[in-house]
Amino acid sequence: MKEDTICAIATAPGGAIGIVRLSGSAVFSIVRRVCRRITETTPARTAIYTPIAVPEWNPEGSVPPLDDALVTLFRAPNSYTGEDCAEISCHGSRYILNKVLELLVQQGARLADPGEFTQRAFLNGKLDLSQAEAVADLIASTNRATHDLAMNQLRGGISSELNRLREQLLRLTSLLELELDFSDHEELEFADRTELLNLAGTIDERVRHLARSFETGQALKNGIPVAIVGKTNVGKSTLLNTLLRDDRAIVSDVHGTTRDSIEDTMDLHGITFRFIDTAGLRETDDVVEQIGIERTYKSIEKVSIVIWLTDERPTRHEIDEMQELTRGKELLVVQNKIDLAQPLCNSKNDLAQPLPSLLFISAKLGRGIEELEEAIFQAAHLPEINSNDIIVTSARHYEALLRAHDSLNRVLDGLHSALPTDLIAEDLRLTLSQLAEITGGAITPQETLNNIFSHFCVGK
């Protein structure tokens, strides 16, 4: 693979400017044949304005160039991949970009596989595995939170944290390995067991803290799910449209219009919330509507926050039923259509049971929506996150941390029960290996690498 020179379009189609990337040992010779103003003495990291043409093109112009472009060269190891690289910036025409690729392939390059540029950066030590995955997360980021998390990981936030833990584990392992080297002298003990217990416990607590952050990371990455539920015709679809500032759902006075769950997202304070407009809850003989109502109940099971929308005073039975249905969820009770009806009174004298988090809105007129949005954000109970916080967003990292936690538990149990040193050392080595899987510091099966990088776009 190192002998191949790869090329790919690195920009989305349809833009004014398009970039074609190359990486590999033959980059400079290929670029010189296609871009005649590039010579053997052209300095790296300098943009050269040059025509792009077939090799037979001559300066007199008998064959017109394909395009004029800015070409930048990067000499190994000072490049994204750690290899010789070039970037050709030309006009974004799909025809031009494809013809540039065709010229490069004719001169000896081959088309890159998805993610191959970043894979080469990893294999050449420019990025570790967690940083390489952060490149894909950064490209896919849709809000401030996911952008900050990806940038933190790309800059080595998780790598630095794991390296600190690995250094501590290596110290423990080295002391135990030293004891094993002198196993003939049973009276020698290089590692104080009390110190080992304290250090192993501290490391395990940090590993568990990182694993616990995965729930927050998934919420930030995938969006916090919020279900809008209630009877038919209380304004659920109108509320969804108002929150999204778009006519996403059909609004009608006819009962049972929404027969399936409708999902869309919006950004609140830099966090993505995923709203689900559900079928109205009522007794019906319509088979299709019944399926929609069943999906409403399934949606409630999956979400973190439930907005119970009503336009009239709920009965004690309805309150009890909804609170039972949403047990373990954040329940926001919202009275809609306050422009048409008197707001409910949330008092013990007025209601058999007080309503939690009662809000008043007019989805049609947009009244009370800002207060509702703030209540939704607060109901998410997100921890205060700053740019230096380490939040795990990858399921692969999460699983490795859980395995490391299990191994550390065996280390702690072994230390408590005076287990033989060689068994404790084996579990420590296993913990080191499991943490190394996250950054790629251990030998990783090729299937794992292929699986990670296959999800990248071509050109990255």
Image (cartoon, helix red, strand yellow):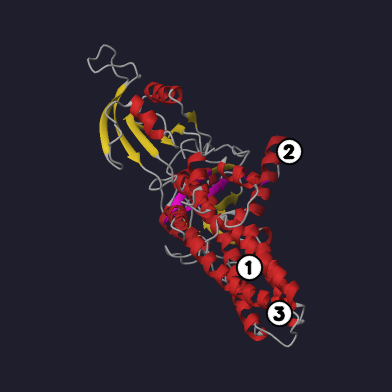
Q: CA distance from mark 2 to mark 3?
A: 80 Å
Q: Secondary structure at mark 2?
A: loop
First along the sequence among labels 1 and 3: 3
- Which stretch is magenta? 264-282
Residue that appears at 77% across and 78% down: 419
Residue that appears at 58% across and 68% down: 354
Examine the image and state in which quarter residue 408 appears: bottom right
Q: CA distance from mark 1 to mark 2?
A: 32 Å
Left or right: where 14 falls relative to 263: left
Examine the image and state in which quarter residue 386 appears: bottom left
Number of callouts: 3
Q: CA distance from mark 1 to mark 3?
A: 76 Å
Residue for badge 3: 182
Q: Relative to 132, say whether 100 is above or below.
A: above
Residue for badge 2: 285
Q: Relative to 296, say whether 164 is above or below.
A: below
